[in-house]
């Protein structure tokens, strides 16, 4: 299971290392981190950040989110990149789905929609390759949805069993609900809960549509060498 790192102001910051991969390998710690919004930093959090040696931030939020909450850590890294997976200037699509959904697992539909941002997704994975020797973090607002889809793709590419990917996804709400800044009481609760069924339904729909992650990455423009490099990223 990926290790959770304690910050005073960041609640859902976790390492993607430590998971069982294909052929019995274990993914390497300290290379790629996933997170919720990077609030702060306090002095403790700045020291923690520096100890991790993170050189790159991939911020997956939409433009209006950046205006409302500028990234407080952007000046602490060598490279800060915004990659908008929302398909719009603000992140309001989930609320639209919640209003008409008949199932609490409707976020699986939203995750499929994120995959249509092919150029943006390709950019994310190329940044992974460009910074393969230096720690990086990718995050959105809560660290569950956009971040969860990127995590699913990267862990699947390494042959991590679905049950472990689901477990990695499911724990997000455990951390998110500790921070009221991440939960809007005016929105439907099911937007925030990381039900395991959401990731399971998304996985099945993904496999039905694309077959596997290698095929998907090639469909958004990555070549064979890039896909092979990504498969070794955490080994």
Image: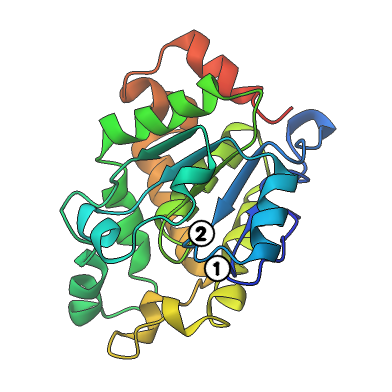
Q: CA distance from mark 2 to mark 1?
A: 6 Å
Q: Please state the horizontal and vertical placement of residue 104, each as a whole percent of the image.
A: 38, 79
Q: Secondary structure at mark 1?
A: helix
Residue identified by numbered label 2: 200
In which quadrant of the rendered view does residue 24 lie? top right
| Residue in view at x 57 percent, y 32 percent | 157
Residue most extreme to the front:
43
CB atoms of marks 2 and 1 within 8 Å: yes
| Residue in view at x 52 percent, y 28 percent | 128
Q: Is residue 143 above or below residue 105?
A: above
Residue identified by numbered label 1: 196
Quadrant that contains the C terminus: top right
Closer to the camera in the image, 122 or 206: 122
| Residue in view at x 51 percent, y 59 percent | 200
Q: Please state the horizontal and vertical placement of residue 232, each as a whole percent of the image.
A: 66, 22
Q: Secondary structure at mark 2?
A: helix
């Amino acid at each position: 299971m990926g290790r959770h790192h304690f910050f005073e102001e960041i609640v859902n910051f976790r390492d993607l290392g430590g998971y069982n991969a294909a052929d019995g390998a274990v993914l390497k710690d300290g290379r790629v981190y996933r997170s919720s919004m990077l609030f702060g930093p306090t002095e403790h959090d700045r020291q923690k950040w520096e100890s991790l040696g993170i050189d790159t931030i991939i911020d997956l939020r939409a433009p209006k989110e950046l205006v409302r909450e500028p990234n407080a850590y952007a000046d602490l890294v060598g490279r800060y990149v915004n990659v908008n997976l929302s398909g719009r200037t603000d992140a309001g699509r989930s609320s639209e789905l919640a209003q008409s959904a008949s199932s609490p697992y409707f976020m699986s539909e939203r995750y499929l929609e994120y995959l249509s941002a092919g150029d943006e997704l390709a950019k994310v994975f190329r940044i992974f390759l460009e910074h393969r020797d230096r720690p990086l973090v990718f995050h959105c607002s809560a660290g569950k949805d956009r971040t969860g889809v990127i995590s699913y793709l990267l862990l699947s590419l390494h042959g991590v069993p679905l049950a472990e990917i689901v477990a990695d996804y499911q724990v997000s709400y455990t951390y998110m609900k500790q921070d009221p800044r991440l939960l809007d009481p005016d929105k439907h609760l099911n937007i925030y809960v990381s039900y395991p069924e959401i990731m399971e339904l998304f996985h099945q729909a993904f496999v039905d549509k694309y077959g596997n992650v290698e095929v998907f990455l090639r469909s958004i423009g990555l070549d064979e060498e890039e896909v092979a490099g990504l498969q070794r990223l955490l080994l």
